[in-house]
Amino acid sequence: MTLAPDGGPDIGLRSPKFFPLLRYEDPAAAVDWLCAAFGLTRHHVITDERGRVVHAQLKLGDALLMLGPDNPVDRYGMHSPRVLNGLNQGVWVALDGVDAHHARARAAGADILTDPHHTGHGTREYVARDLEGHVWIFGDYWGEP
């Protein structure tokens, strides 16, 4: 293994990216809903011979979300919050125009957990739950300390 100038592993010329991967009982409905409520766009959708969504990639700007169907024998043990009757993670999305995004999500029927507000650490954010219970935090924090 080669090391980068800072002593960490050399990851090459391209910066790593994180792509959240979520499971939905009804991935086709999730694709439609996420596009309508949160403004994502279809990037790549794969269906099987019956037309069921088996994998989808949605974009918001240059950010990518992957999703697929819930499966009782999922190789990663991942499930929809509906199946789990709970969840153990959320998706943070940095964007400009938090209030306008909130208005769009509310109009599309998103379950708004917190309205847009200023946090104690200098950001503005709101929190919503999607059609199957995943929690999404939309705010103007871009990762700067």
Image (tube, rainbow, N blue to C red):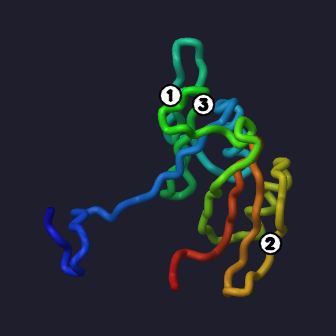
Q: Which mark is residue 24?
A: none
Residue at horizontal 55%, vertical 27%? 73
Residue corresponding to mark 2: 116
Residue 71 lies, in percent from the top left, at 59, 28
Mark 3 and mark 2: Cα distance apart in space: 31 Å
* Residue located beneath label 1 in the image: 46
Which residue was labeled with disc 3?
69
Pair 3/2: label in front: 3
* 116 relative position to 32: left or right: right
- What is the secondary structure assignment of the residue under circle 3? strand
Residue pushed farthest top?
49
Secondary structure of residue under mark 2: strand
Which residue type carries mark 3? Pro
- Say whether marks 1 and 2 touch (CB < 8 Å): no
- Residue type highlighted by circle 2: Pro
- Residue beneath the point at 82% across and 48% down: 108
Q: Nearer the viewer, residue 137 or 39?
A: 137
Q: CA distance from mark 1 to mark 2?
A: 35 Å
